[in-house]
Amino acid sequence: MTSVIVSSPYVAPGNTLKRLMIQVIIALLPGTLAYAWHFGPGVIVNIILAVLFALAFEAGILKLRAKPVMPHLTDFSAVVAAWLFALCLPMHSPWWLVLIGIGFTMVAGKHLYGGLGFNPFNPAMVGYVALLISFPREMTTWYLPGLVSGATLSLADTLAYTFGNADISQWDALSSATPLDQVKTAIGQNISISEIRSSPVFGEFGGKGWEWIAFWWFIGGLWLLLTRTIRWHIPVALLGGVLGMASLFYLVNPQIFASPLFHLLSGAVVIGAFFIATDPVTAATTNRGRIAYGLLIGLLIYVIRVWGGYPDGVAFAVLLANMCVPLIDYYTQPRVYGEK
Amino acid sequence: MFKLHHFHGGMHLDGHKAESLGSGLKQASLPERLLLPLKQHIGEYNKPLVDVGNRVLKGHMIAASSSLFCASVHAPTSGIISAIEDYPIAHPSGQSDICIVIDVDGKDEAAEPVIVDPRQLSANEMIDLICRAGIVGLGGAVFPTSPKLSRGKAQGIDTLIINGVECEPYITCDDILMRNQAAEVIRGTGYLQHILKPGKTLIAIEDNKPEAIAAMSKALVATPLASTEIISIPTIYPSGGEKQLIQILTGKQVPHGQLAFDIGLYCQNVGTCVAITRALEFDQPMISRVVTISGDNISEPGNWEVRLGTPISHLVELAGGYSHGTSGHLVMGGPMMGFSLSTDRIPIVKASNSIMVMLRETIPQAPGYHDECIRCSKCTEVCPAQLLPQQLYWHARAKAYESTQEFHLFDCIECGCCSAVCPSQIPLVQYYRAAKSEIRAAQKAQLKSDRARIRFEFREKRLLLKKQKDDERRRLKREALKKKHAKPGDAAALADPVQAALDRVKARKKSLQDDSQ
């Protein structure tokens, strides 16, 4: 008998990195499709471009770092990061914008720290924030959902724009600030919330179209919870943080503070709660720590939205909370068996 | 209804118990030779009591030690001692150790037993007999039973827990033992009660063993014991771990740094109870045990009562041989906490509850490569010790051993749950075992160097004291001399030593003369 010496346990792995990542991709599908439904094929083009660039960067750097390429490429972690990054982009972005952002995501956000598992900051958010700061004009050119403008850009127009030989000004009529941005600008000009809400871009609760996308992110999030890909602590605490802050200020003065439901269903709160803040590598690891981490992000999102310089604050809030993770983890260690 | 509690984490695993339960308990035939390692327990080494060429009978003590934390070894059958030398033994490191080799003569001739009525024995006499029988805990820890009983008796036991949980997959030796030898388990429990005088006794069995529960209940009716209950507990790994079982049955946790005794609890495995019964009633030392042989590369999985020292290859033959060729994993123990064996020449020892013969493909884990930790904390969710395995891994990997202790490395019971759920397939427990042994080695080295330092410092101090004493003596002598010399008060005499000596002689002569007068 020749026996191979390996350490216990001798059970076939029930769980793999790849399976986790595939669960996340499945959960992203409904929200992504809803997003594309409301805003046109640009959303999908962004994702495909980002994923291709990300895989190329991942392979190149793994090669440079003399690491095995295929096992890492096929764990789909790069696909998930690229997908999340692409969802942060305006629905129509030039290819070079995607390239630069993905470069930041994969190189600065992930591999400069040692690759998967070693990055302290959410890579997709690193890439997005780098673009937001470096290319404010391109990053804030948003378009109206089909529900408002009656049409979205065709695939041909989208590709023409993305690959750089189309005149952007011809679609000026379709471009618009996001609902969050409009609220922020209006309040700056002393226009009350009720006046702003009469604008056609607003739906029942949040932005028209946007609120449905948030709903589908929520469905994807439930899938993640049901498959135990993520635990409830971070999403619940994060949504609780946003809702808590928004409710408090809404009760104080509903004319200058938007409703809690508006905050919940606009921008990136729901996708942030279920998909971005729950990135295990950069989130807190203890259950109590996850609650603290989620709450912190929720509070920061509201603070940045209402008093900060940007209309949405999910990316900044996540990055700031990432910084606090080692501290949170240290102080929220669970009670060990037998300890008083 | 007995109130049960929960412990943190744990896992529901595929039991794989049915494979080895179909054929009952069989007696294993005698092999040609038996290899008996000198040390089959936790504690001190035994010394051989026999020489090469001696003939031994079944039950003869062939190795023992004067240490209390020791369990003697007995000849499992009659035969000639043919060698006392190194052989590969069942150890995670794959090391060899000294074994007494018996060439079996096939007569199975037993030494004359000294039968006494156990009811006439005092508690201490029982502990003595258990000690002489070389009995160790058969639940996995192989801790010598007699010192454990002495300590339990001294500290006073409130609840005696008999562990028939057997939560690891594949292993069915305790199940089959309870089905076939329930009366002996119950009688052994009675002897433990006689020694420990517990307020109550709980016999815990996982609810996936209804036949064992039925057999034990029947035996308990036939031989009633005072305030003894058979408790069926839910099947969840690792409910058979001592600390987890205590929590399930009592809701209490063994406080950090203490033992079960300290909260009035005492746990013993059902197999140990049978061993105690045999030692007390039939004067039979520990020379055999029930072993499960199972896995997907063995033709006829089952349970055998095997003489200690039987090579695994002999047991494999009894079980119909390898079903898919002779390469794969040979594991002693269960799939969660067992360890790989390098060869089937290794003998069965007191700790061998199970031999698993697995196909290479069953465990697609490649040695050496694993993905990186993504901090998903699945390990934290299942950890029954409520640790943060991913933090422990981080520090263990970085060899930051002080930090591993801050994260309670030594509270890890090595149950394997964290490794089993890890999506990156990191052999977490292996990292912890390595860290633990590094820390223990460092502590040992530290202790040694501390002792050396203390010895050295003591020597330095002693030498310094001696020097001071000597200096002081010399100084006093010098002063005394000076005083003597100063007596004549003659500076010139002091200046001339010859004159001074002459003066001294003169003075002495004078004084002698004075004396004689």
Image (cartoon, rainbow, N blue to C red):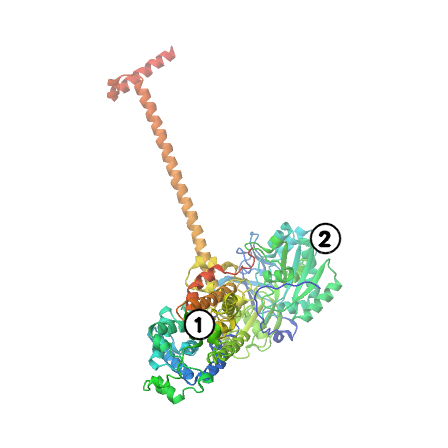
x and y percentages locating residue B31 in the rendered image: 58, 69
B412 with respect to B126 (left or right): left
Mark 2 vs mark 1: in front: 1
Q: Quadrant of residue B352?
A: bottom right
Q: Secondary structure at mark 1?
A: loop
What residue is pinned by disc 1? A191
Q: Say above or below: A53 vs B169.
A: below
Q: Amino acid at mark 2?
A: Gln
Q: Say above or below: B178 vs B494.
A: below
x and y percentages locating residue B73 in the rendered image: 58, 59
Classed neighbour count for the residue bearing mark 1: other residues with Cα under 10 Å, few (<14), some (14–19), many (≥20): some
Q: Amino acid at mark 1?
A: Ile
**From where the camera sits, is residue B344 visible?**
no
What residue is pinned by disc 2? B120
Classed neighbour count for the residue bearing mark 2: other residues with Cα under 10 Å, few (<14), some (14–19), many (≥20): few
Between residue A283 and residue B57, name the one nearer to us.
A283
Between residue B10 and residue A244, name the one nearer to us.
A244
Q: Are marks 2 and 1 in contact (CB under 8 Å)?
A: no
Between residue B246 and residue A60, name the one nearer to us.
A60
x and y percentages locating residue A202 in the rendered image: 48, 78
Q: Identify the chain of the residue marked 2, using the numbered disc in the image.
A: B
Q: Secondary structure at mark 2?
A: helix
**Viewport quadrant of the C terminus of chain B:** top left
Q: Residue furthest top?
A: B517
Look at 32% across and 23% down and name the residue there.
B481
Look at 28% across and 20% down and name the residue there.
B501
Q: Identify the chain of the residue marked 1, using the numbered disc in the image.
A: A
B62 with respect to A292 (left or right): right
x and y percentages locating residue B384 in the rendered image: 56, 64
Q: Say above or below: B397 vs A13.
A: above
**Viewport quadrant of the N terminus of chain B:** bottom right
